[in-house]
Image: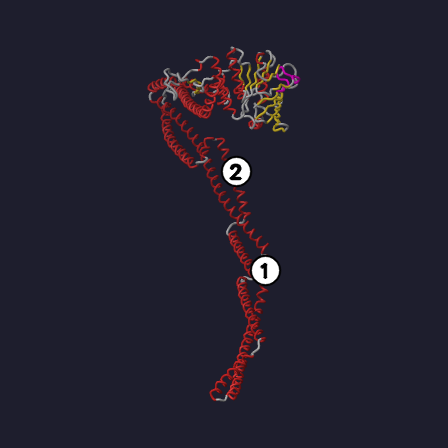
Amino acid sequence: MRILEVILDGMGCFRRDSGAFDFDGDRVVVLGPNEAGKSTLMRSIDALLFGFENAGEESRWRPWGTHQGFGGRIAFEVKRRRFGLDREFDKNYVRLSQDSTVIFEGEANPRGKSGEPFHEVLSTILPLTRSRFFQSLSFVRQEEMQTSMSDDLRERITGGHRLDALKVRANLEAMFAELTWEKPPWGNPLRKKRMVEELQDQLKDKRERRNRAVEITRRGSQVLSELQTLEARINVIENGIGTSESVLGKQEEFLRLLEKESRFREKLIRLNEELRRVEALTGSTQSLRDAIHSEFSDFASMPPDTTELLHELKTKSSQEEEIKEQISVRENVIEEETEKPIVGWHHYAIPLAAGVLIGLIGGLVAGKVILAAIVGAVIGLLAAALWTQKIRSERTRQFGALTQELAILRSQYAKLSEGLTPLLTQLKPILRDSSLEEASQRWKSYQKLSTELMKAQAGLSNNRPLDTIRVEHHDVQIEYGHVADRIDQVVEKNSYLGIFRKEPEKLGFEVEREKENIRSLDSELSVVKRKRDDLKVEWRGQVEAGVDDVDDLEAEIQALEKCLVDQIRKKAALILAWECLTEAMDDIRDEHQGIIQQRTDELFRAWTGGADRSVILEKDWNPWIVTPDNPRVAPELLSRGTLDQLYLAFRVALSEALSQDVPLPFLLDDPFVHFDPQRRKLAWEAFEAISERHQVILFTQDPDFRDWGKLVEL
């Protein structure tokens, strides 16, 4: 965090015409003589950021004399973001802007509830939102280099100087020591008697006096004493029963709420599952319907046996093609046979040549060659005529068979074509301009989508309507929210019940235990009341007989008993408060001490050049020095300059740890006024190193610091 500019309007000695104070620098020196307004300017930075947390502090810084305004403006930078904050203290008015954008504007009284919204906004920018925290971490005044360190730490941890944890614990221990001499849980037994023991002694003395009086007054006084004791016991038991019944009522109510919340939670889980399932089925059904409507809208009118029809069409189409091919083959054969001559020249030449050859051979044997040749030629011609006749008969028979087969095939083809016509008519929506194979694939896709649609519709029919589920889910969510709100309200009023929220079964055990306690107290109360009634009867008889009473002594004893009970309760409360406070301090110490100790050690080594010395923090947050020669060196044994460096390192480590990733500035109010030259040089060097991460603003009257940083003169 870097403070950039401050403008004051009627704060202390400053007026609107005082101008703007430019603080935009790593090291800033505010130089001015006494009464020039350095302290006012320093305090105004804190007041403009966080306001005045008490009316006395606000009245102290009001403008001197008559002035209309009482406020101002501060500009600061956090993580390279520039902010401007305007305040009017009389009106509790605040306006916070980032660059030119207003992020908060309105009333913000740090002493009232109206300041909470502004604190929430401011907490997103700065690591702290309270004036006392900022002062304890950033302000270093004269002679505060050492003494404010441990106090500031305790104040920051416990929430302010009014709740200094160590002081509170010391007060608790002192109160316990004043109360009793018994051994406390944190130390050795005390020697001197205290209030509890004195009360016990007084009570013992009173009881002895009463016993003597009882002996003197014989049975009458004894009866009265016993009666009063029983009355006191009855009151204690009745109070215990009332307390237990009140606790039991709250526990039972909380248990019922937890059981109701569990039932609603389980019901919501079931409804969520049902809702997701039905929504998925509804979406799937609608998607399938849309797909069928867009892709297969003309398939809705198809008959149920479309698959068989497609198969039949495919079979008959295949048969038709096969018969068509056979017809084509037969027609080609007939055409070829028709064009080819039945008898060729060789059918005559071969038999004639054979007859002549045979005749010649026979003529050579018989010696009549010519005659034999003529006879052989005649025989050959006759053989040729017979052969050609046989060939013509065979061709005629084959041609007739082919013609008959062709007629049969054409008849079959006509029947198939006639049978395909109704099939094509029925399957026309599927076939359209596609092939039979494509139509079959589209029909299979349609059947698959239809099957999926039927399954989805069947799933929907087995579930409740989606609107019904949504209405019930909405109603259950509302009821669940009401129950959760009621549980939060109960926990807010009875915080101890919060531990049972995740483990209601343990609360059930507590309820049974409380019931058993009430039953036990009721039983004891009945016995005590019966005994009291018997004593009253006896007492009335004794009074009527003129027995003396010991009312004064009994009244004193009751008062002492009540006082003793109160003191014993106070003792138990002190022990519990001490233990709780110690435990809280230990938890916070465990959270912060390691980081602060490590950073303090690093800074102390760097500033003192003592590589062989280290710093440790003890449980009381007091720093100690460890050296090779001495494992425990008290800070008081160090030189004053080294001691200031130690506590300054402690202060810086504390600021870094508690301001997290937003380094706070250090505002120094002449802390070196009493330093010798050597210590002043060490302090300069220390704050020069600090200014690398934290802005350092020095308010001083010493002109020697003029060149130490950016100069602002008053």
Q: What stretch is highlighted in magenta?
A: 6-18
The image's colour scheme reads secondary structure
Q: In this view, does 711 lie to the left or right of 648?
A: right
- Observer-nearest of 429 and 379: 379
Residue under the point 54% across and 18% down: 688
Q: Is mark 2 on a helix, strand or loop?
A: helix
Q: In this view, does 391 lie to the left or right of 188?
A: right
- Observer-nearest of 329 and 417: 329
Residue 515: % across, % down: 40, 34
- Observer-nearest of 586 and 370: 370
| Three-letter code, disc 2 | His
Pick the quarter of the image with the C terminus: top right
Pick the quarter of the image with the N terminus: top right
Residue 452: % across, % down: 52, 54
Residue 224: % across, % down: 37, 23
Count of numbered circles in the view: 2
**Label 2 neighbour load within 10 Å: few <14, some 14-19, many 20+:** few
The residue that label 2 is drawn on is: 482
> What's the distance in space between the residues labelled 1 and 2, CA to CA?
64 Å
Q: Quadrant of residue 97?
A: top right
| Three-letter code, disc 1 | Ser
Q: What element carries label 1?
A: loop
Q: Which of labels 1 and 2 is toward the front? A: 1
Q: Quadrant of residue 128?
A: top right
The residue that label 1 is drawn on is: 434
Q: Is residue 16 magenta?
A: yes
The answer to the question of whether label 1 and label 2 lie on touching residues, with beta carbons closer than 8 A, is no
